[in-house]
Amino acid sequence: MSIRFSLPPQIESVLGQNGQEPSAAAKEAALVELYRLRRITHFQMCEALGIGRLEGDGLLKRHEVPMELSLAEFRAELAELRQGLGS
């Protein structure tokens, strides 16, 4: 899905700070907010942004959003860690 909207140049330049494309920054901000509101999971946020779990953790930290894993996400992460350890 593609969403388009117009912003004043001043706001567009704020989104473009840090060298990030303004549309990518807006997408990131929207997905982080959906996560913060508990409308999407950490996995969904990372998948939509095309980033890995650790990058997602860092993203939430940069946006000062506490990470909250669902029980299912916790169990999936635990299973993945166990696989990596060969248990």
Image (spheres, rainbow, N blue to C red):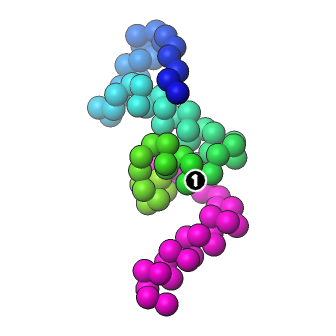
Can see residue 62? no
Residue 26 screen position, x and y as percent: 48, 28
Magenta span: 58-87
Residue 45 screen position, x and y as percent: 54, 46
What residue do we see at 67% from left, 66% from top? Answer: 72
What residue do we see at 60% from left, 57% from top? Answer: 67
Which of 73/32 is in front?
Answer: 73
The secondary structure type at the circle numbered 1 is helix
Residue 84 screen position, x and y as percent: 43, 80
User: Is 50 displayed left or right of 34 in the figure?
Assistant: left
Which of 78/30 is in front?
Answer: 78
Image quadrant where residue 12 sits: top left
Give the class, few, some or many, for how many residues have Cα within 10 Å of label 1's Cα (few <14, many ≥20): many
Label 1: which residue?
42
The three-letter code of the residue at mark 1 reads His
Residue 19 is a magenta residue: no
Residue 31 screen position, x and y as percent: 55, 38
Q: Residue furthest front?
A: 1
Q: Residue furthest left?
A: 19
Tell me the chief SS of the magenta region: helix
User: Is 19 displayed left or right of 27 in the figure?
Assistant: left
Image quadrant where residue 24 sits: top left
The answer to whether 60 is drawn above or below residue 87 in the figure is: above
What residue do we see at 42% from left, 25% from top? Answer: 23
